[in-house]
Amino acid sequence: MHGITKRFPGVVANHDIDITIRKGTVHALVGENGAGKSTLMKILYGMQKPDEGTITIDGEQAAFHSPADAIARGIGMVHQHFMLADNLTVLENVVLGGEKLYGIGNKARQKIKEISEAYGLNVRPDALVENLGVADRQRVEILKVLYRGARILILDEPTAVLVPQEVDALFANLRELKAEGLTVIFISHKLGEVLSVADDITVIRRGTTVGTADPANTTTKQLAELMVGSELPSPETRESTVTDVPMLTIDNLQLNATDPDGAVREVLAGITFTIHKGEVLGIAGVEGNGQAELVEAIMGLRNPDGGVITLDTSDLSHAPTRKRRESGIGYIPEDRHRHGLLLEAPLWENRILGHVTEEPNSKRGLLDLKAARKDTERIVKAYDVRTPGIEVTAASLSGGNQQKLIVGREMSHAPKLLIAAHPTRGVDVGAQVQIWDQIREARREGLAVLLISADLDELIGLSDTLRVMYRGRLVADADPATITPEELGSAMTGAATGHLEAAPEDEA
């Protein structure tokens, strides 16, 4: 890709970008949020057209008007948010839209089997997608693009929701792909993983390429500083700020769900814990083991079938969500698009969201739009939200900048309790450090935090107390000072480990 430039109203997303990718390699693309990585890959995949520049594949110049054009030239993309139909089988998902290639019967099944075996993907064609874990779903997505003949694969944040063992398995798959002459473009904010799997690294900063790096001779710190253009602060040493004052108490929380066939199953069973002022309680678990339902029950988005939820001294077990917010709960949701933002509304309206009755958004019962706009500008500056202005829509921001806006909004009202579900997902290393520092500073001032994260380094680094959730139960406790990501990952998949204790009898 040579001289790629892409402009949008008020912003230049890509400016004169050059990137050369060698066949049969894993090429990592790294950069801060809003640096232009996603735009560049959308251009390569035919989702957007560049204003300037050329794309050359195997020595031939290419022009893409749609993803179909890119697919025809052997380019496939696995998006960070999977594009699978849960109610269909693996085979049905793979052939969907590609029925003309090998039909929908035995020929398609044989092709899927051949690809799966050739690249060590180990997928079962007849498995229902809704019954698959995150790592298996990702392999289905990779299989989909290989089925369509892709020789160049774009993987966008492929390890964001994987535990260490699943990351190792993915990297083994990537090495198989590379050994067969395929080319992988690997987009990630996890720099340690980038250095372990990449053959070449290109760094993008503020819309343009600023350099390349050789993984064999580069440290994560050097790579991070190349990304942000300045030296990063040293990591903060662990200090205890935990008090003996309970802030959130969950007692014997129960939640059931009814399946389509009418069967009732436990989603949460006997969940009991307390978070004190100044304490970060981290919940570790493979996605789909009840963490999301726990957060939704605490926020009033789901009605539990039993148990008591107490904030400070107030029983909120049956309170509506608005009452819980007004009682002092800040909320960084797992899905920022569904629960955190109005994508088509301007940034200043999103700043008000969930805090309509609080200062500075309202005065004497009336919205103060001038003050809300001014405070939005403060958040944009304080949290380095990359935007041409506060009147643009939330949809126009990159995912990481959307996340920084939400974090800034929720931290701006001095909450008693912060529920942080994946607070730095999709956020670059510089912004990640900033968000962690904001949480630590608020914790020193007495904030209680419930932290849900798939980033095990984040869980271990931020938490004062660690609990492991498995199949809707809290099954083990871990000491963040001694546990390793590998041990924590094993516990999350149901395996025993030496640095874990079983949860108390009334909780497990």
Image (cartoon, rainbow, N blue to C red):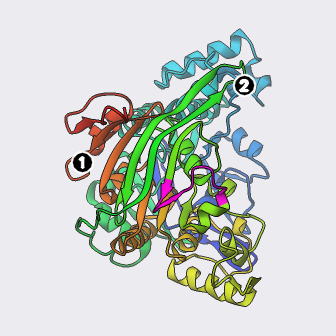
Query: Of the residues tagged 2 and 1, which is closer to the observer?
Result: 1
How many C-alpha atoms fall within 10 Å of the one at disc 1: few (<14), some, or many (≥20)? some
**Residue at point 72%, 80% (across, down):** 10
In the rendered view, does 9 fall on the left or right side of 317? right
Determine contact: label 2, label 1, CB under 8 Å: no
**Residue at point 37%, 67% (across, down):** 224
Magenta highlight on residue 145? no
SS label for mark 1? loop
Image quadrant assignment for residue 68: top right
In this view of the protein, which residue sits in the foreground, 119 or 462? 462
SS label for mark 2? helix
**Residue at point 33%, 73% (across, down):** 444
Residue 191: tell me if it is visible: no
Residue 434: x and y, percent? 42, 72
Residue carrying label 2: 95
Of the 4 image quadrants, the one containing the C terminus is top left
Answer above or below: position of 7 versus 450. below
What is the CA distance from the residue labelled 2 to the residue labelled 1? Answer: 46 Å
Residue 189: tell me if it is visible: yes
**Magenta-drawn segment:** 310-321
Residue carrying label 1: 479
How many C-alpha atoms fall within 10 Å of the one at disc 2: few (<14), some, or many (≥20)? many
Magenta highlight on residue 315? yes
Residue extending furthest top?
106
> At label 1, which amino acid type do we have?
Asp
In this view of the protein, which residue sits in the foreground, 54 or 173? 173
